Image (spheres, rainbow, N blue to C red):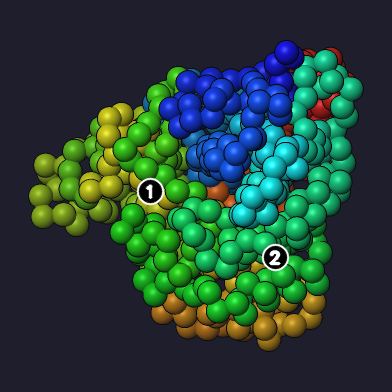
């Protein structure tokens, strides 16, 4: 029997050692003749497709570090060289972190495809919902790929052997977006308005992701209409206390449109980050060798910049929630002299990502740098409102745009303002969403990256390079992105 591969041979990574996947017997090496015989087979395969969402921490890091919001940080410049290259805009086709984004998302796609390839094997109650969730996940993973790499190979409803990969071209990003739209349009009418289990895709999540895909294509009328459905559903609202949005105690509140769910009870290792069931971001972004109250020690990655700190106006409470000024925090404690921490040689700004940081009381099992139970907020209702404001402004409905922006401002008790420019909406996105992995992609899609990111080369850095090893494994068939 031919062993089915993912997108290239390089994508057969150390997934099969992950405990969660051992329930699929064995995962993705069986053909359809001896699998997908029972409803439980489909459910187990769907769990496997969801599991690649756990790798979202890498998108968060790169979305901040590639922008003006953060530097790579860490122990040294050799500590995760890929992130330091991205920080310096010196990255090329040999970059382990970009390769991880590429292959992890294709693993997720392959797992969704495996379900959809075998969708007609048996009939059972609830199968339509499983297929809709698989389509949502495939759309999510392709959206990650297209925003990182532009044109990418488009594989639908099938797995491929290595010999077949050499015949596949990179699909134009318009075709990839068309498939994303198709999957989400087919998924959302079937998905439940409220998830039957935390973390599963819902109708609102599919609509919000569809609206976001429209925004990235400047399809403003379609985006506005889609966000209207989310807003008018009445299922979502802004959580009243911004400072509570990123703690475990208030997860899955009414502002949650879609979260990646993490647990602190099970982990992988530094040698298999894709195996993690905990969120790596809070530990990696924690304060190096910290000894003091509130926080736990970490690895000082993804450090906010002075530019981001200074961007917030005085009195905006979102600054303190987003950026931890470590020296100001220590000075405000009753025993500042007893608090210590270390500075990594990978860079130090004096600031830490306060949204995703290791806190006492939210620490998982050893190694607790890797097992944070803090969820990743993929899409919040505030993000939906601000994207809806942007779409409305482009359509000339500035009054509605202003209403949406001022709802977001009102939640943090900041006076409303006149929204008479797109710049004000863009600024509000930075105030509201910094530290969450959106900034680089916002700057690129709005045409502002050249102005805001040091070293950014227009015509090149809008997308990241296709990993060279994947090009080689495809027989050199795929052209590299321009400038790389």
Which label sits on residue 374? 1
Task: Characterize the local packing of mark 1: few (<14), some (14-19) or many (20 or more) Cα atoms within 10 angstroms.
Answer: many
**Residue 239 at x, y = what percent?**
42, 71
- Would residue 70 be found to the left or right of residue 93 on screen? left
The image quadrant of residue 388 is bottom right
**Residue 72 at x, y = what percent?**
49, 35
Residue at point 65%, 67% (across, down): 387
Above-or-below relation of 13 to 362: above
Q: Are marks 1 and 2 in contact (CB under 8 Å)?
A: no
Could you give the CA–CA distance between mark 1 and mark 2, rounded to whole angstroms?
30 Å
The local secondary structure at tag 1 comes to loop
**Residue 327 at x, y = what percent?**
27, 48
Instruction: Say whether residue 346 is visible.
Output: no
Viewport quadrant of the N terminus: top right
The residue wearing badge 2 is 189
The image quadrant of residue 466 is top right
The local secondary structure at tag 2 comes to loop
């Amino acid at each position: 029997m031919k062993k089915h591969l993912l997108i290239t041979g390089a994508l057969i990574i150390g997934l099969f050692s992950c405990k969660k996947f051992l329930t699929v017997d064995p995962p993705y090496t069986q053909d359809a003749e001896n699998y997908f015989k029972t409803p439980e087979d489909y459910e187990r395969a769907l769990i496997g497709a969801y599991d690649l969402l756990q790798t979202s921490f890498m998108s968060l890091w790169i979305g901040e570090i590639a922008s003006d919001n953060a530097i790579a940080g860490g122990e040294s410049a050799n500590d995760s060289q890929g992130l330091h290259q991205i920080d310096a805009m010196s990255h090329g086709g040999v970059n382990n972190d970009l390769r991880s984004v590429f292959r992890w998302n294709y693993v997720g796609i392959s797992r969704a495809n495996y379900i959809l390839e075998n969708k007609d094997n048996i009939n059972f109650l609830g199968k339509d919902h499983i297929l809709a969730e698989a389509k949502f996940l495939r759309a999510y993973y392709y959206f990650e790929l297209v925003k990182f790499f532009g044109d990418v190979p488009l594989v639908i409803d099938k797995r491929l052997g290595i010999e077949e990969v050499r015949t596949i071209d990179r699909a134009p990003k318009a075709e990839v977006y068309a498939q994303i739209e198709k999957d989400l349009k087919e998924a959302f009418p079937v998905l439940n308005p409220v998830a039957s289990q935390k973390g599963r895709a819902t109708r609102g999540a599919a609509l919000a992701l569809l609206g976001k895909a429209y925004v990235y294509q400047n399809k403003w009328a379609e985006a506005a209409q889609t966000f209207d459905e989310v807003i008018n559903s009445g299922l979502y609202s802004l959580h009243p206390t911004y400072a509570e949005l990123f703690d475990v105690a208030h997860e899955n509140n009414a502002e949650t449109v879609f979260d990646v769910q993490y647990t602190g009870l099970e982990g992988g290792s530094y040698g298999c980050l894709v195996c993690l069931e905990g969120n790596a971001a809070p530990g990696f972004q924690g304060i190096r060798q910290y000894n003091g109250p509130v926080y736990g020690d970490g690895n000082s990655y993804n450090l906010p910049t002075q530019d981001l700190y200074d961007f917030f106006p005085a009195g905006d409470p979102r600054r303190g929630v987003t950026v931890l000024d470590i020296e100001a925090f220590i000075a405000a404690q009753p025993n500042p002299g007893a608090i210590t921490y270390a500075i990594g040689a990978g860079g130090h700004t004096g600031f830490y990502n306060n949204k995703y940081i290791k806190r006492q009381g939210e620490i998982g099992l050893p190694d607790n740098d890797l097992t944070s139970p803090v969820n990743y907020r993929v899409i919040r209702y505030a993000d939906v409102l601000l994207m809806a404001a942007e779409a409305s402004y482009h359509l000339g409905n500035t009054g509605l745009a202003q209403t949406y922006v001022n709802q977001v401002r009102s939640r943090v008790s900041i006076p409303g303002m006149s929204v008479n420019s797109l710049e004000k909406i863009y600024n509000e996105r930075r105030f509201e969403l910094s530290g969450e992995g959106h900034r680089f992609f916002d700057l690129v899609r709005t045409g502002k990256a050249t102005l805001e990111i040091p070293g950014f080369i227009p015509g090149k850095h809008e997308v990241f390079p296709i990993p060279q090893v994947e090009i080689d494994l495809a027989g050199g068939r795929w052209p590299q992105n321009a400038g790389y």
